[in-house]
Image (cartoon, grey):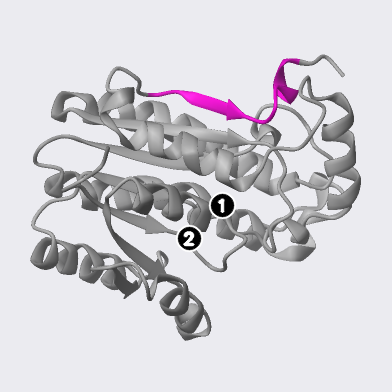
Amino acid sequence: MLQNKFGIIFGVANKRSIAWATAEALHEAGARLAFTYQGERLKDNVEKLTSEMKGALVLPCDVVKQEEVDATFERLRQEFGRLDFLVHSIAFAPKEELEGEFLDTTREGFLTALEISAYSLAQVARAAAPLMTEGGSIVSMTYYGAEKVVPNYNVMGVAKAALEASTRYLASDLGKRNIRVNTISAGPINTLSARAVSNMSSMLKHHAERAPLRRNVEAREVGNTALFLCSPLSSGITGEVIHVDCGYNIMAV
């Protein structure tokens, strides 16, 4: 499905992450992939995970450092020549902002969450667009806390709302270049990063009890949806928030 296609994935940290499940789906479909890591602390993890993926690139890229973003896309230009898709699976807020009340959000926490979790989508899309010479697809990851109040999600909910709005504006801007921009609203998954949200176990139980499918979504199901959005099968879809949450979002309670 993706033979002779080139893509980059931002956000792989470990084998339990949604980004890695997405990488596996894209790799199995035949794509050649590049990966980024944020800081030396994560370099070894990403290199080990990708060691058996033929032709994979592993590049340092902290999105708060514009020079690293620029260097990443210059390397892609040199190695791949073009880019067919980009997966943005980056989000961060200080742990103390993900407990208690949103009312107590600090200015620093707010700015950090919005810069890394939302602004970075526009940042990498702007860098990727010139390489998407044959059109392309940009996919990011969001969550239901952007639409409704989820206890303890706090500033991350605001950041994800900004991400979803950014998706629509970017889709409008980039459509004339045949570049599609969509985001996946995944149900809660027990990843290492998700554990920063207080009471994650209660959230998982709540979702499984109320979702129409009576279970929680799996990371690979999200990855398969990303594969669909990166492939020609989704050629008429852009600017959308696609829920992959076992149907939880349709329920009133």
Give, as a single range, the part of the protein colored magenta: 239-250
Q: Residues within 10 Å of mark 1 (few under 14, many from 20)?
A: many
Q: Is residue 245 magenta?
A: yes
Residue 191, quarter of the rendered image: bottom right
Q: Residue 141, percent across and down? A: 52, 42
Asked if residue 117 is positioned above or below residue 70 in the image, the reply reads above
Q: Residues within 10 Å of mark 2 (few under 14, many from 20)?
A: many
Q: Amino acid at mark 1?
A: Ile
Mark 1–mark 2 CB contact (< 8 Å): yes
Instruction: Please name whichever residue, 165 or 193, is drawn nearer the observer in this view of the structure.
Output: 193
Residue pointed to by mark 1 = 18
Q: Amino acid at mark 2?
A: Gly
Instruction: Please name whichever residue, 11 or 69, is drawn nearer the observer in this view of the structure.
Output: 11
Q: In this rendering, which labeled residue sits more in front, label 1 or label 2?
A: 1
Q: Is residue 175 magenta?
A: no
Dot 2 falls on a residue whose secondary structure is loop
Residue at (70% x, 36% y) in the render: 145
Asked if residue 171 is positioned above or below residue 88 in the image, the reply reads above
Instruction: Please name whichever residue, 27 or 209, is drawn nearer the observer in this view of the structure.
Output: 27
Is 60 left or right of 17, judged from the image as shown?
A: left
Residue at (87% x, 19% y) in the render: 253
Residue pointed to by mark 2 = 11
